Amino acid sequence: MRCSYCIPEEGVKFIPSDEILRYEEILTLADIFIGKGIKKIRITGGEPLLRNDILFLIERLGTKPIDEIVLTTNGILLGEYAERLKDSGVERVNVSLDSLNKNTYQRITKTDSLPRVIDGIHKANKSGLKVKVNVVAMRGINDSELLDFVNFGKKNNIGLRFIEVMPQYYSEEMVKDLFIGSKEIVSQIEKEYTLTSLKNSQKGSVERLFEIRETDYKFGIINAMSDPFCSHCNRLRLMANGVLKACLFGEDGPNLKKMLGENKKEEEISRAIEKLVMDKPEKYFIDERTTNLVMNRVGG
Ligand code: SAM
């Protein structure tokens, strides 16, 4: 899948396989993060369901003392995996789906997988997984579908989040044209419904929650661009090559795979993590650091 706002037309350079974290390394690092108080692990990508034996990793993570394992996926293989994901300990799947229209979906993703993704969402729902659909709102592409998404979520009892499109290293100009801010998203939904803005009770949550007063359906907006949530973002992102980042837009932190390879002690790795967190700026500097965002590597 090659979503145009995420992957440049010429494609991406794949990391050599010996530079990718092995499952044993991920599990060792998971123990270190858990020791530092991490309670939630999200598996993303690339496309996580394409990785061999992904269920092995999830099952092993599931035995660890954490509250939640979630997975972000394009949904193409979700139908095949739904039941096994649930059985392996996944609590929730976030499915990236930017259009409910066959032609628009094809235009965005360059695939005709929409029916498979919808089927995957239904199967995931049926298997007892919580499902949340992530929609990147884009002017002139899917902005006429925002209400359709709300109605789809409401009808199928599925969570929904609109995401403001973020500029990446190669797409700053393109994103300027596509950008729709949260105010406009809200006013589109208000054409049909009355919305109440809710206080988000979940610690570290990066979405702004809204409730439709006519029903009790709630949806979120990730308004990273129009109202950055840096002050309460508590996420750390471990990339496939072992590089740790404290911010989507931030510079690369320590390479934890390299540290493991050099037989660094657990305390040293732990200190490197701590330092990255302590040095995290209060707010990202999007103007100067846009080139640091490579969403297809950090996984959203
Ligand atoms: N393959 C998985 C998927 O499709 O969900 C995980 C990786 S994908 C990079 C994770 C999320 O990042 C998706 O929901 C995608 O829409 C979002 N994303 C990618 N580029 C973005 C951008 N420029 N602005 C906002 N969200 C973006």
Image (cartoon, rainbow, N blue to C red):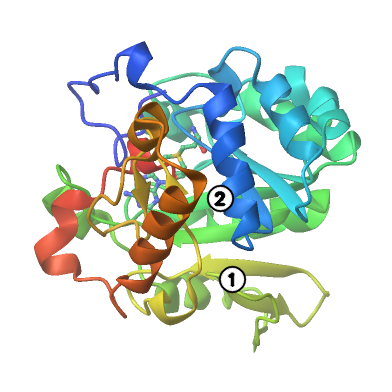
Q: Which residue is mark 1?
A: 205
Count of numbered labels shown in the rendering: 2
5 or 28: nearer the viewer: 28
- Mark 2 residue crowding within 10 angstroms, few (<14) / some (14–19) / many (20+): many
The residue tagged with tag 2: helix, strand or loop?
Answer: strand
Q: Residue at x 43, y 26 (%)?
A: 106
Q: Is residue 59 above or below residue 170?
A: above
Q: Based on the displayed image, in which of its 4 quarters is residue 71 positioned?
A: top right
Quarter holding residue 76: top right
- Residue type indicated by callout 2: Asn
Residue at 82% x, 30% y: name it. 88
x then y, percent, for residue 66? 75, 53
Q: Residue 116 location, x and y as percent? A: 66, 21
Residue 125 coordinates in the image, percent (x, y): 83, 40
Horizontal and vertical percent for residue 98? 49, 43
> Can residue 110 be seen at all in this image of the molecule?
yes
State yes or no: Cβ of the residue under disc 2 lies below 8 Å from any atom of ligand 1. Answer: yes
- Give the amino acid type for the residue marked by disc 1 in the picture: Ser
Tell me the crowding category of disc 1: few under 14, some 14 to 19, or many 20 or more residues within 10 angstroms, Cα based. some
- Going from N to C along the chain, the mark reached first, 1 or 2, is 2
Q: Residue at point 66% right, 67% down?
A: 219
Q: Within 8 Å of ligand 1, the CB of disc 1?
A: no
Label 1 secondary element = loop
The residue to which callout 2 is attached is 134
Q: Name the residue nearer the viewer: 201 or 98.
A: 201
Residue 220 position (above or below residue 118): below
CA distance separating discs 1 and 2: 15 Å
Residue 11 or 292: which is nearer the viewer? 292
